[in-house]
Amino acid sequence: MSVPDGSRGVSRGAARFAPAVGAGGTLEQTPNDLGFSMQSTSSPPLPGFVVLYRWRLHPGLEDGFVQAWSRISELLRARGSLGSRLHRGADGIWYSYAQWPDAATRDAVFALGSPDASASARMRGAIAESLPEIVLEPVADYLVASPQGEA
């Protein structure tokens, strides 16, 4: 699954990078304590609504879950989602990071019901435990979108 094109830069050691914001909201070239500089002109606006979903899955059903999650995610992109990523944590928890233009768009899309009832049923069947979703507020974004067709 790809993410909308338009990388916003790459940050190594982002926690230690303190960009200087110039006139017009653009980032100025600023060295960090790792010895390299970063330059960015105006970056695209951050997605307005991000949700982190978390699950524990039944052993042996992971592949079916990934296939079903991928199908649902593709269809949600066609309905207005900005995309999502699925991760497996070392803690045994599966994480999905989903971006939406705003909460109203997600609510309207979810009100339409599942875009694929069969895939939704496969996902539900693979989930042993759903943990509460976490709404995140983007404050900086240096995630690089992978070229279309690459994982």
Image (cartoon, grey):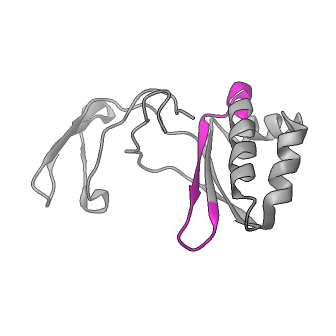
User: As drawn, which residue projects farthest toward the front?
Assistant: 60
Give the tally of numbered discs. Answer: 0
Q: Looking at the image, is 115 positioned above or below residue 13?
A: above
In-front residue for pair 99/62: 62
Q: Quadrant of residue 145?
A: top left
In-front residue for pair 62/144: 62
Left or right side of 25 for 104: right
Residue at image location 90% in from the left, 39% down from the top: 117
- What percent of the width, then of the height, locates residue 11? 28, 49
Left or right side of 70 for 35: left
User: As drawn, which residue projects farthest toward the bottom?
Assistant: 91
In-front residue for pair 13/105: 13
Is residue 130 visible in this depiction of the protein?
Answer: no
In-front residue for pair 7/28: 7
Left or right side of 84 for 146: left
Q: Looking at the image, is 56 positioned above or below residue 103?
A: below
Is residue 46 visible in this depiction of the protein?
Answer: yes
The region drawn magenta spans 76-94
Where is the N terminus found, in terms of image quarters?
Answer: top right
Q: Looking at the image, is 104 positioned above or below residue 62?
A: above
Residue at image location 55% in from the left, 53% down from the top: 137
Asked if the magenta segment contains residue 79, the reply would be yes
Residue at image location 43% in from the left, 29% down from the top: 147
